């Protein structure tokens, strides 16, 4: 065999979309940060639904999945559990030791892979947000409270001695709109049961109002608190089949107008508000309202300059009617039918002020407002996008019939700053009072357009980073996550036998705390205040040593240094074979590495080989070796990197 010559001083660079990656892991995972009720680390990770529901999501934990999450740079998993998955039969105090050993295995897998594990009773005796509902009420039933405390005491006994850096207990999922006193009473009993056997265990309680509202009343109990990242709900749960009416919501945008779909009636005085349109109509104009869902009874009242132009009563019920779908809610003994039907009113010429209100009954939704001047062939369509419960109509809409390209202006919009004010600031106020805070669940369902999802996720991640909050995406694999999400508008990558949304994964890794995008790395290693902007670009060579910045980023080299440690090299392998060695940074995001060969330094081809192995790994980088075919002709080798920018 003729030894290969290696062109180690020349490295190709192609700025392109991500195609694939290889993952490696050090023998010893990095240590987890200390955690306490008054200071939660900025964990980053995922929820794993293996024990989420006894009937349709009850499977063994995968060691490979824990490894993959750690290898990708994350350090946290939350395990939402249905308590029925570890019972023997239907007796809620008869525990199955074999089933509990599967929970033990999840805790152990977390420790082996450097992942904090947070156990959560998503369904606790007496309460759940899932279906079917519990037959007893955790907040009023003493027996449900006793049994719930027994469950947590049983779990606590199994894990005494595991440090809080590795394990926490998240009591139960998303308590409803009960009083703080009622909630505190339950939390106190559960904490007492846990602390009777494990006094120092880290305990986390979700906020009230389904995780959205901080609870200062819990401070004396010394528990951390968790919030949710599902705002705006119309974006995160668009067309979610478990949310009634979501199939009729307007397609989400981000940023978007702050315009709720709800019109609340007198039965919801705390949310009741009026939608106001400002305009100047020179001709009569048809106003079309697409009514979505109506609860119990509502009256849509539309006024133009104070005069009634439409008064429409809605009383949903069984059988046939103006509605398209009958929905009966037995817990309230009411109908909440979906109409999905247009209702028309005429706005007279000279109208300057239009109001829409619900003046009778419970609540209703609308999905479109159409405005079409007489004689015009074009209808301007307004689509509300805020589906969050309780959102009031506070945005004033201006309709401009003479501006067909942009007929509507809005007094308020939903954007990153709005998201911070609405969802982060109240929790920062709690954090400043000495309470540890994290985002226990967040993400966007797979029917929201991918580009909208990524834009919203980036703003959410920036906010979490700014606030110093840890987070856990609702799925790793599933409709909210980066793996096997079944989105229809994503070019998936085949990854470890699964379908990976690389764009979402790159974004999450960028904010994982152990990874950094090229711009983040650039700003850290080549500060803008001391470096001309042109020298900071990926294809530039910052210090003139022949290595472009992108190559330094991908392989973990410092662009300010000129040493040759860390460059690829060629060594003899077994027998007549050779091996090409190269380094991969463990902080890079979205880079692909290609080993290529050439006979003339002009035409390059991917080196095809099945011999590829990890040589070594540290917390900062990995070394890989690729076998060079023994029967190859003399030539050159190079390492080409592709960045995802």
Image (tube, grey):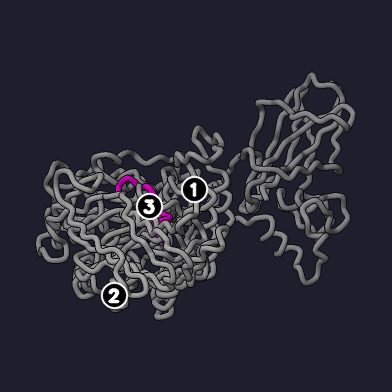
242 in the magenta segment: yes
Q: Earlier in the sequence, mark 2 or mark 3?
A: 2
Q: At which x and y percent is residue 432?
A: 43, 79
Question: What SS does tag 3 mark?
Answer: loop
Number of on-image labels: 3
How far apart are the alpha carbons under marks 1 and 3? 13 Å
Identify the mark at residue 218; answer none if there is no mark.
2
On screen, residue 349 versus residue 583, left or right, reads left
Q: Residue at x 78, y 59 (%)?
A: 536
Question: What SS does tag 1 mark?
Answer: loop
Q: Which residue is mark 1?
A: 449
On screen, residue 564 versus residue 525, left or right, reads right
Identify the mark at residue 249; answer none if there is no mark.
3
Q: Earlier in the sequence, mark 2 or mark 1?
A: 2
Quadrant where the N terminus sits is: top right
Highlighted magenta segment, given as a residue range: 232-243
Picture quarter containing residue 54?
A: top left
The reply to whether residue 644 is visible in this rendering is yes
Identify the mark at residue 486; answer none if there is no mark.
none
Of residues 332 and 279, which is closer to you in this image? 279
Of residues 632 and 311, which is closer to you in this image? 311
How far apart are the alpha carbons under marks 2 and 3? 36 Å
Of residues 125 and 146, which is closer to you in this image? 125
Q: Nearer the viewer, mark 2 or mark 3?
A: 3
Q: At which x and y percent is residue 644?
A: 66, 47
Is 541 located above or below residue 630 in the figure? below
């Amino acid at each position: 065999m003729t030894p290969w010559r290696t062109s180690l001083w020349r490295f190709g660079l192609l700025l392109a979309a991500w195609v694939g990656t290889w993952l490696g892991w050090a023998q010893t995972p990095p240590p987890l940060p200390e955690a306490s009720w008054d200071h939660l680390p900025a964990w980053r990770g995922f929820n794993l639904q293996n024990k989420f529901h006894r009937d349709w999501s009850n499977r063994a934990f995968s060691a490979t999945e824990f490894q993959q999450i750690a290898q990708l740079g994350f350090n946290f998993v939350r395990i939402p559990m249905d308590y029925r998955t570890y019972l023997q039969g239907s007796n809620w105090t008869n525990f199955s030791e074999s089933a509990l050993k599967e929970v033990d295995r999840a805790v152990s897998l977390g420790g082996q892979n450097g992942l904090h594990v947070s156990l959560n009773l998503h369904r606790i005796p007496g309460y759940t947000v899932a279906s079917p509902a519990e037959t007893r009420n955790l907040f009023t039933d003493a027996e449900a409270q006793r049994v719930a405390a027994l469950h947590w005491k049983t779990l606590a006994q199994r894990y005494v001695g595991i440090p809080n850096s590795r394990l926490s207990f998240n009591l139960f999922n998303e308590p409803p709109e009960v009083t703080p006193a009622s909630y505190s009473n339950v939390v106190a009993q559960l904490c007492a049961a846990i602390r009777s056997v494990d006094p120092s265990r880290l305990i986390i309680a979700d906020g009230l109002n389904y995780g959205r509202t901080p609870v200062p009343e819990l401070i004396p109990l010394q528990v951390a608190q968790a919030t949710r990242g599902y705002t705006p709900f119309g974006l995160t749960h668009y067309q979610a089949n478990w949310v009634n009416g979501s199939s009729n919501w307007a397609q989400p945008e981000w940023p978007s107008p702050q315009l709720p779909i709800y019109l609340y009636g007198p039965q919801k005085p705390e949310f009741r508000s009026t939608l106001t349109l400002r305009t100047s109509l020179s001709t009569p104009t048809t106003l079309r309202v697409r009514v979505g869902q109506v609860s119990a009874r509502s009256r849509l009242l539309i006024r133009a300059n104070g005069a009634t132009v439409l008064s429409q009563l809605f009383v949903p019920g069984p059988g046939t009617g103006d509605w398209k779908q009958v929905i009966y809610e037995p817990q309230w003994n009411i109908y909440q039918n979906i109409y999905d039907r247009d209702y028309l009113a005429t706005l007279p010429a000279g109208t300057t002020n239009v109001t829409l209100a619900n003046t009778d009954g419970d609540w209703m939704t609308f999905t479109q407002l159409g405005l079409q001047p007489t004689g015009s062939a074009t209808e301007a369509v307004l689509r509300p996008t805020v589906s969050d419960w309780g959102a009031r109509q506070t945005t004033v809409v201006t309709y401009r019939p003479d501006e067909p390209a942009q007929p509507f202006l809005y007094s308020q919009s939903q954007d990153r700053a709005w998201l911070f004010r609405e969802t982060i600031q109240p929790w920062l106020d709690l954090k400043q009072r000495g309470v540890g805070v994290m985002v226990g669940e967040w993400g966007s369902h797979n029917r929201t357009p991918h580009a909208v999802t990524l834009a919203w996720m980036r703003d959410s991640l920036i906010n979490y980073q700014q606030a110093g909050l840890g987070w856990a995406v609702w799925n790793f694999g599933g409709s909210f996550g980066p793996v096997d999400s079944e989105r229809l508008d994503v070019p998936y990558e085949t990854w470890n036998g699964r379908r990976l949304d690389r764009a979402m994964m790159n974004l999450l890794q960028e904010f994982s705390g152990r990874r950094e995008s090229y711009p983040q790395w650039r700003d850290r290693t080549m500060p803008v205040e001391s470096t001309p902007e042109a020298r900071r670009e990926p294809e530039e060579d910052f210090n003139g040593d022949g290595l472009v910045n992108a190559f330094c980023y991908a392989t973990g080299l410092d662009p300010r240094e000129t040493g040759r440690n860390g460059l690829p090299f060629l060594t003899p392998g077994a027998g007549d074979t050779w091996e090409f060695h190269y380094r991969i940074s463990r902080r890079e995001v979205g880079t692909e590495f290609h080993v290529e060969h050439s006979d003339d330094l002009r035409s390059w081809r991917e080196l095809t080989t099945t011999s590829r192995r990890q040589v070594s790994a540290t917390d900062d980088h990995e070394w890989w070796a690729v076998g060079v075919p023994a029967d190859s002709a003399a030539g050159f080798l190079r390492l080409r990197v592709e960045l995802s920018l």
